[in-house]
Image (cartoon, rainbow, N blue to C red):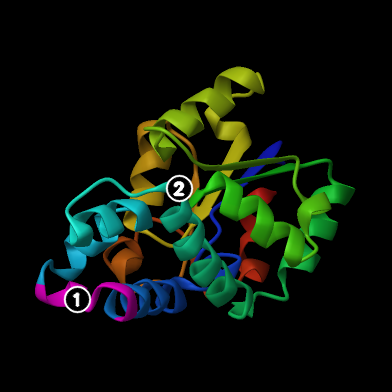
Amino acid sequence: MKKILILDFDGTIIDSNFAKKSAIKNFIREKYNIEISRIIDNYKFQSLTRYELISLVKNSPILDFEKSEIDTVVNKSVIESNFDQYFFDLFKFCTKNKIKIILVSNTPEKSLKEIINKLKIIDCFYKLIGKKDNNDKKKIFSEIIKTELVKPSEILSVGDSIDDYFASKVNKIPFHGIHNYSLLNLAKNIPLSSTLRGIIKSLK
């Protein structure tokens, strides 16, 4: 039985990836009159944070009030997205088996906490770790191993992107993918499921 479950957020707990992209693109179009897709390709878009995208289109550092504006728009789009109802079955299983759930997301930490609070699932997590400074998931996963005094084999990482997979692989943490086109090439090497219900078997 695993001791720790690391969960990604967007695209894993909640189907918000498309909604977030659309919200950011619409915000940039309405506020700056710019079509971001004409400036950068989708890969570049995916690699930049919402704050970096705003700085790019305005060609200057993003200000605090602008961060607040984009956070409000994006947070609303996420909260209104489809939530995986099997999350509660997973939470019950982890509670019964004393598995700590750590939420690790590339969403800015302040926004992540606000969203989780509004979804009323804050008490389901042992820890919340959002994006701040230059931390990335590879470093975060390594820190979890050290601070929680566990072996990589005692952790299960769950996510929907190739970055989640590589962050897990670098740290030798078992990975379970939530069905996403970016993970299809790995289908022979990792377990994949369409909902969180499918990961319970990987926790045993």
**Residue at point 38% right, 40% down?**
167
Residue 81 in magenta stretch: no
Q: Which residue is mark 1?
A: 34
**Residue at point 41% right, 50% down?**
164
Badges 2 and 1: C-beta atoms under 8 Å apart?
no
Q: In this orientation, which residue lies closer to the viewer: 20 or 181?
A: 20
* Label 1 residue SS: loop
Q: Which amino acid, mark 2?
A: Asp
Residue 31 in magenta stretch: yes
Question: Is 123 left, or right, of 19 in this rendering?
Answer: right
Q: Position of residue 153 (x, y in %)?
A: 56, 33
Q: Above or below — where is 55 with respect to 26? A: above
**Residue at point 35% right, 80% down?**
26
- Residue 74 visible? The answer is yes
Going by the picture, which residue comes out furthest to the left? 39
Q: Quadrant of the N terminus?
A: top right
Which quadrant of the figure has residue 84? bottom right
- The dominant secondary structure in magenta is helix
Which quadrant of the figure has residue 24? bottom left
Q: Position of residue 124 (x, y in %)?
A: 79, 52
Q: Which residue is mark 2?
A: 64
Q: Above or below — where is 32 with respect to 51? A: below
- Residue 2 visible? The answer is no
- Mark 1 neighbour density, 10 Å: few (under 14) some (14–19) many (20 or more): some
